[in-house]
Amino acid sequence: MKPNIAQLLLGLVLCITVLLLSIASPFFMTWDNWRNILDQSALLVIIAIGMTFVIVTGAIDLSVGSVAALSGVCMAVAMHAGMAVATAILLGLAAGALVGTSNGLLISRLNLNPFIVTLGTMAVARGVALIITKGIPIYGFPAAFIWWGSGHIGALNPPILLAILITLLGALVLNQTKLGYYALALGGNEEALRRTGVAHQTYKLIIYVICGITAAIGGLVVTARLNTAEPLAGSMFELDAIAAVVLGGTDMKGGRGSIIGTVMACLLLGILRNGLTILSIPSYYQQLTIGIIILVAIIVSELRLKNAWEND
């Protein structure tokens, strides 16, 4: 199954889901509800695009949820210490980049398993956030910071615009630059890329830094939206991001990926969550649904890859 066919099928599922929910509830197709869907999906889009770059290399990053929490805590502490909002945001983004750099160095230079490394940094980042806050959420931020989570630019919120901007940049980088080409090549055949003389370790490092920064931007959005820096925030972000990436047509073994597919999958997950909420279905069934989607997406991805090998 070619990636464009996978995206067509995803689009079909998206349309069917919208149709069914429109029939099930008269509130679903209202603009206020759709703006809410887009606003809630924006956070996942931002994080999942960074995850897409990692997964197309054939790797994974389990630390994104903890990085989002740590970045939000860093921003909160900086603002409570009297720093300007812009400085605090840059500090939070730097924290995300630092974790991404650590992941990238350990994986690319020491050739360690990405699953194990990012599982460790997930625990470290979460632990640091808990130590900084002593486990107590930090409340109360300037209006200029809260705007990033719940402000308005015309009919849209800043998280939606951030998601659109990151989507455009992600698609441009993955499809039109050397970084995107080498990211796909790392997942397709890293050894062949190494033998051509490409500094594959450097590109792998850059990709993890990108993922760390997008996770930190997610931390900015969720912290500003809640007006609270919660050290336990971001729980399950990594699973949602992985589900969206794989559901969007990116192979878990790397070498093939799509930013547009990832965004479509994020919208589908956002619509499903919204629809289940409107239909008064308990939240824990929503997590069950996401888990089933992950399993189905991985099975489909593996079957697609197996068929591709057999056809070759």
Image (cartoon, helix red, strand yellow):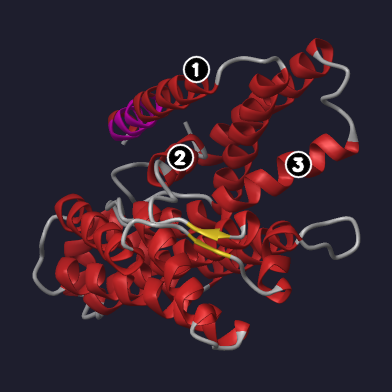
Q: Position of residue 162 (x, y in %)?
A: 67, 64
Q: Distance between the residues labelled 3 and 1?
A: 20 Å
Is 301 rendered above or below residue 107? above
Which residue is at the front of the view, 197 or 237? 237
Q: Tell me if I can see residue 248 in this picture.
A: yes
Q: What element carries label 1?
A: helix
Mark closer to the observer (1, 2): 1
Say whether residue 47 is left or right of residue 27: left
Query: In which quadrant of the rendered view does residue 242 lie?
Result: top left
The image's mark for residue 36 is 3
Residue 112 falls within the magenta-colored stretch: no
> Looking at numbered disc 1 in the image, what kind of residue is underneath it?
Tyr
Q: Mark 2 points at which residue?
A: 240
Q: How far apart are marks 3 and 2 (CA)?
A: 18 Å
Q: Name the residue under label 1.
A: 285
Quadrant containing the C terminus is top left
Q: Tell me the magenta residue range.
A: 300-309
Say whether residue 138 is left or right of residue 59: right
Is 176 rendered above or below residue 164? below
